[in-house]
Amino acid sequence: MQPRALIASARRLLGRGRKGKPRQSDLKRAMSTAYYAMFHALCRNCADSFIGTNRASRSLRAWRQVYRSVDHGYAKAQCMNQRVMRLFPSDIKRFAVKLRELQEQRLLTDYDPLSTFTRADVQTAIKGLHNSNIRDRKAFAAWTVMKKR
């Protein structure tokens, strides 16, 4: 799953360039899609950090295993752990905060039939991770996937 393609889908659902209010169903799908874009960015970061980015020299099975090992709930809990999150640079902290917020919004959009959103709500949700350096991204990958024993 390509995070950028999901962001593009979310923007299309917002009715970019169209006048008038988007339908609530489109806004809700856009919010959910924005969350999944961030979640898949996290999965890709973890797989790339542990297995590598060079397709020719990495094990596809291992890369897929790491990608699929990211758990929504565990990642959210780790992103909420302020004791450790304070050790990361601001761009990763912003990504972690936005991931948590979007996960909560996605739950509302998918399971609360009375929730409503505006175009601005969804646009604000669509931003963030790859600006940080590789060392910090790898540390964040380990933090969001591996359970402390």
Image (cartoon, grey):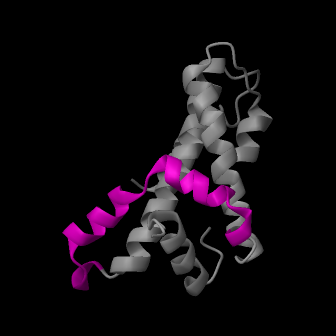
Q: Residue furthest front?
A: 149
Q: Nearer the viewer, residue 134 or 21?
A: 134
| Total marks in image | 0
Q: Is residue 86 visible?
A: yes
Question: Residue 129: where, in percent of width, then height?
Answer: 62, 67
Q: Which residues are magenta?
A: 55-84
The verdict on residue 61 being magenta is yes
Please give left or right for residue 116 compared with residue 49 in the image.
right
Q: Quadrant of the C terminus?
A: bottom left
Please give left or right for residue 20 compared with residue 146 in the image.
right
Please give left or right for residue 136 compared with residue 83 in the image.
left
Q: Is residue 113 above or below residue 67?
A: above
Q: Nearer the viewer, residue 148 or 134?
A: 148
**Residue 145's quadrant in the figure?**
bottom left
Q: Is residue 131 above or below residue 82?
A: below
Question: Residue 6: where, in percent of width, then height?
Answer: 50, 47
Instruction: Tell me what residue is drawn at x 65 percent, y 49 percent.
Output: 100
Instruction: Tell me what residue is drawn at x 56 percent, y 21 percent.
Output: 111
Q: Nearer the viewer, residue 108 or 73?
A: 73
Magenta-colored segment: predominant secondary structure = helix
Q: Is residue 8 visible?
A: no
Question: Residue 63: where, in percent of width, then height?
Answer: 29, 70
Q: Residue furthest top?
A: 114
Instruction: Tell me what residue is drawn at x 34 percent, y 66 percent.
Output: 66
Q: Nearer the viewer, residue 81 or 5?
A: 81
Q: Is residue 15 above or below residue 127?
A: above
Question: Residue 92: where, in percent of width, then height?
Answer: 68, 69
Instruction: Tell me what residue is drawn at x 55 percent, y 25 percent.
Output: 110
The verdict on residue 94 being magenta is no
